Image: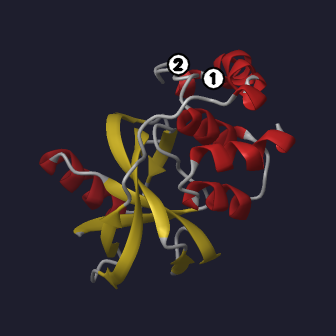
Amino acid sequence: MNSIALFPLNIVLFPDGPLPLRIFETRYVDMVRRCMRETQTFGVVLIREGNEVGPAETYDVGTLAKIVDFHQLSDGLLGLSCVGQQRFRIRSRSRQADGLNLAEVDRLAERPAVAVPARHARLPELLKSVLPQLGEVYTDIEMRLDDAAWVGHRLAEILPIPLAAKQSCLELDDPIQRLDVLSPLA
């Protein structure tokens, strides 16, 4: 079990997925500083109720985010480039005096890579043509088109489906089951 800082967002971050962020609240600037200094990740969790700047109720499964680059944006805010790492499940929550959410989490083990089944062969081809068109956030992402989990995670993050459906895909442990769910939508 690990203690991590939580960043509740109106987005579902998937393992290996890109996450560009604009940081403006002091509690998150401090969190980023600590993550950079101690080479730590933070947890991204989807907001179930509430909003990003106020108190929010979140789902229990999220994804660790690693900061890979930072820069000052033209408006003076801190811009981050992050990438999703391992999924986790929240065991307990607390809040610091500055409002930063903390959680004790269990990291969810990832299964060994599984090939994309023949019945879903069109899905990697779809990603191969679509991802390069989605801008620079996918430029440095290594394409693993033969890995069912990777393909399912990319589809879930780019398909225009409700956030609750994306969250359900994140929570699925079986990568083939995730492809079965997403295939009719792609």
Decide if residue 160 is on the left or right side of residue 66. right
Residue nearest the viewer, comparing 112 with 75: 112
- Residue 153 screen position, x and y as percent: 59, 41
Q: In what element is the residue under mark 2?
A: loop
* Whether residue 173 is situated above or below residue 151 in the rendered picture: below
130 sits to left or right of 75: right
Marks 2 and 1: in contact by CB < 8 Å?
A: yes
Mark 1 belongs to which amino acid? Gly
Q: Which residue is mark 1?
A: 135
- The quadrant of the rendering that contains the C terminus is top right
* Residue at far left of view: 38
Name the residue rendered at 47%, 44% in the picture: 15
Q: How many marks?
A: 2
Report how far apart the C-alphas of labels 1 and 2 lie in the structure: 7 Å
Q: Residue furthest front?
A: 118
Residue 116 position within the rendered picture, expressed as x and y whole percent measured from the top left: 63, 29
Mark 2 residue type? Thr
Disc 2 residue crowd, few under 14, some 14–19, many 20+, Cα 10 Å: few
| Percent coordinates x, y for residue 165 in the rendering | 72, 59
Judge whether 142 appears above or below 70 on screen.
above
Which image quadrant for residue 97? bottom left
Residue drawn at 32 percent across, 74 percent down? 103
Residue 80 visible: no
Q: Residues within 10 Å of mark 1 (few under 14, many from 20)?
A: few
Pointer 2 residue: 139
